[in-house]
Amino acid sequence: MKKLMKIVCVCLTALMLFSCNQTGDPTPSDDMKNYKGLYYTRTFTKEGYQNPANIFKPLPIVNNAGGEYIVELAEDYGYGGIVTNIPFSDRNYLHNEEAVEMFMESVQYAVENGMRLWLYDENGYPSGTAGGKVTEDYPEYEAQGLVVQKHAATKGKKLTVEVPYKHVLLSATFYPTAGGNALYSGGTDISASLTSGKLEYTPTANGEVVCRYRKNYFEGTHATGNWYAIRKQLDMLNKDASDAFIESTYERYYDLVGEYFGDEIEAFFTDEPAMAGMYFDPPPFRVTVEDEPDENIPLLPTANYTWDMEEYFRQTRGYSLLDNAVYLFEGDSEVAQRVRWDFYKTLTELKSNNFEGNIAEWCAEHGVAFSGHFFDEENLYDHPYFNGNIMRSLSKQQIPGVDFLSNNMSVAVGWAAVTPKLASSAAHFNGENRVFVEISNDYDSNKADVYGKINTAALLYACGINEFCSYFRIFGSSSMEAHEHQLFSSSLGRMGYLLKGGVQTSKTALYYPAESLFVNAIIPENGRKDSINSTMHAISTNFTQIAKTMLTNQIGYEIFDSTNLTLSEVKDGHLVTPSGMQFKNIVVPTAYALEEGVAEKLIEAAEGGVNVVLQNVDNVLASSAQYQGTLNNLLASLKNKATVASAIDGILDAVKSFNTEGVTLLSKNATVIASEFAFKGDNKSYIFVNTTGAKQTVNAKIHSVGTKYKMWGVATEEVKAISANTDGEYSTIGVTIPANQAVIITVE
């Protein structure tokens, strides 16, 4: 369950423009100001490090308070600005005069004092309804679900089926039985047999009646299992619905403070948008009930749906979804798997285009960036049900991001190996530098001290995050004292000063197995999230273990889905993205299915000098029966050109032999996370994160030779010159890292 202990506030993640100047640093370029570019030119001074500018500092989230005082408090605590919104009240909160006045006072004070601003786009989470106003005014924009029921039918015996309460019959079909199994083709449409809420039909042969229903998908979902408020959620697949959300919220803020868009106001953040997905338990405490659930509605297994989905599915996939909808809930045949594949691909297209893409387009037209993070992003097995291919949603945002709700390193390292890398990979592929996180410790029963909070941020920096929004509150039930806030904000500012504008050196592309998830994403018999099948869990666990193994062995990697892979070129022994990043390795985890074009690109890469590592590509499903033979032949050929390594240690060994850049620890140490960041020109930064409670000393080989080597303390202002042994293109340095802290080495 997401958002543990999240009461009033919702996650807004802050991402900062490189638009301010710091004494001793060059003025940031117009490209930085306009959210363009991947690598930036940076030089570092002790003065700039000890007094980092606001562009390098985190922003606290302030949802339910406003006025000059709150911005001044953030300023006193050393933050770079705030994330804010019109304070919450009722469903008309965006037009509450007193709340609007408080908001305007906050904005004006921030503008006058050079503080940065982000705007949060919802009253609570998930985003999409303007605190319930959109779904109240437009009930047709509420999330929709598809229910399928089967009924045995006996020759000559009347079958009576009652339409479930608050469900609408879309179609009903009788299928004759052959060999004891219903064949879901060539059936007879019996929808006209519906009278007064009952379907009555007398078959002329033994068979099965399949009924498909549409319903408002609210009861039992994360909309009622929400930790903020029980409220209906938006139909994320419907462009008209997101248009209404934009009009209610984004246009409202533009009317109020649009003059500051693109300068002082940098971005909007959308919080945890998701399809209804599956059923949840309610939270263990009482939350505000804004929309009363109807307890009489049966919680039947349900798939995500929207009003025109059947028409869209026919147009894009070439056949009827409704006729084949049984396979969303059962079946392991190739036909069943391909129906699920097409279904989740369709959900991906509709959600990423009609919600994220629609809002991102509006933001681009109005001079601000669109950012945010998505519901249940931590585990791959959740992705199809709530977001489809989450890489497609992230790729629509100008500033992709995640939330990170633990400061417990035993949890944090595993999460950091996946979610930050999904967001940073999406940003980098699109040629963007900025990647953000909403940071808190809501998942932790034992809360870390301020140094643990800082070290978690260091871990996230090492994984590609470079902008931070903090839910460590600055007022009310604050988890930190004033001096701790000041240490937290200054420490993150110092890390930002040394790392922002650079990109982590990554020479390995890790394949995101969206298709494998899609074909296995059967909706459980009870429709519940906690009943997702073991194959989905195995795919998710395997991917996470591969990523974590690379992270803890200092292997820089980016995550590629089929779109990113096929859009890249093979050139001079590397896989090269449109943004210019070059990869020497491609790792493909165990695959159950592969999109057309992937195997062809992998063969091209292997023949072009790229090290392709396959875990298991036996019995891989193709996207169509016609393409299956071709895929089989391609994969048979590929295995002769690639490295096949079923065990994760074997994958690591295969990648290490080609990992000639970045940072390498000369003695194995999986508890130190180390990453190299490259800037325009020859300057580089290296972050070393100690994830343990004991001081550690490591010797590291880095792919850089310079005239100045410096070590910068993250939780201190200490800067000192260090020595290095050089050999050709490499240097060897000794690094001592305090317990639960991080240090950064720069080479100039």
Image (tube, helix red, strand yellow):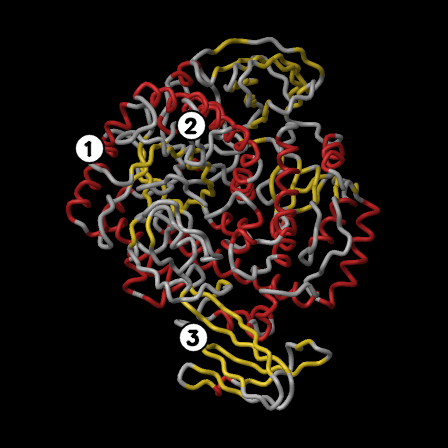
Relative vertical location of residue 619 with respect to residue 544 in this rendering, above or below: below
**Splitting the image into 4 quarters, where does residue 462 fall?**
top right
Relative to residue 592, is residue 111 depicted above or below? above
Residue 427 in view: yes
- Which element is circle 3 on? strand
Distance between the Cα atoms at labels 3 and 1? Answer: 52 Å
Q: Quadrant of residue 246?
A: bottom left
Q: Nearer the viewer, mark 3 or mark 1?
A: 3
| Residue named by callout 2 | 447
Are the residues flagged by discs 3 and 1 in contact, CB closer than 8 Å? no
Please state if 724 lies on the left or on the right of 291 as rendered.
right
Q: Secondary structure at mark 1?
A: helix
Report which residue position mark 1 lands on. Answer: 68
Count of labels shown? 3
**Distance in Å between CA atoms under marks 3 and 2:** 48 Å
Residue found farthest to the left: 98
User: Which badge, 3 or 1, comes first in the chain's sequence?
Assistant: 1
Is residue 580 shown left or right of residue 272?
Answer: right
* Mark toward the start of the polypeptide (1 vs 2): 1
Image x and y of residue 401, in percent: 46, 41
From the top left corner, tell me how far across and down residue 360 is, in percent: 42, 51
Q: Where residue 168 is drawn, which disc sits there? A: 3
Where does the image place residue 470, in percent across and percent down from the top left? 38, 33
Q: Position of residue 629 (x, y in %)?
A: 79, 63
From this view, report whether residue 436 is shown above or below residue 663: below
In the rendered image, the quadrant that contains the N terminus is top left
- The amino acid marked with disc number 2 is Lys
Q: Quick one: 455 or 114, which is closer to the camera?
A: 455
